[in-house]
Amino acid sequence: MSIKPLADRVLIEPKEAEEKTAGGLYIPDTAKEKPLEGVVVAAGPGTKDVNMEVKVGDKVLYGKYAGTEINYNGKDYLIMKQSDILAIL
């Protein structure tokens, strides 16, 4: 990965949105909700005030509107501050 987050930021690969409901119905693209779960792909070194608690490979939950969406090499990622992460799974 050539994207290297700075300070207390992390790069997250969001989980794919569900294609089908539990009952087997297909969900159209317009009705899909943004996933709130992902995997940490890269993490910054932290700051003198903030120690990094997440590491590469951690599954995390984050807020619905957290982070900035970026597209790199055809893949979608989110970059956000560590404080925007709600939990490590």
Image: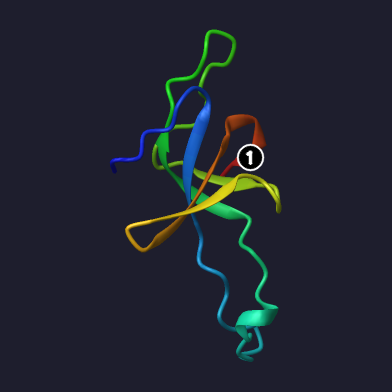
Callout 1 amino acid: Ala
Q: Position of residue 28 (x, y in %)?
A: 63, 86
Which quadrant: the N terminus?
top left
Q: In the figure, residue 23 lies in which quadrant? A: bottom right
Q: Is residue 29 above or below residue 35?
A: below
Q: Residue at x 58, y 31 (%)?
A: 82
Q: How far from the left and from the top, in percent, is residue 36?
A: 63, 55
Please say which color scheme the image uses: rainbow
| Image position, residue 15 (x, y; %) | 51, 60
Q: Which residue is mark 1?
A: 87
Placement of the C terminus among the 4 image quadrants: top right
Residue found farthest to the bottom: 25
- For disc 1, the neighbor class at 10 Å (few under 14, some 14 to 19, many from 20) is few
Q: Name the residue at 28% across, 40% down.
A: 2
Residue occupying the point 59% across, 33% down:
81
Q: Is residue 84 above or below residue 29?
A: above
- Is residue 34 toward the left or the right of residue 53 in the image? right
Which picture quadrant has residue 17? bottom right
Q: Position of residue 43 (x, y in %)?
A: 43, 32
**Is residue 51 shown above or below 38?**
above
Give SS at disc 1.
Answer: strand
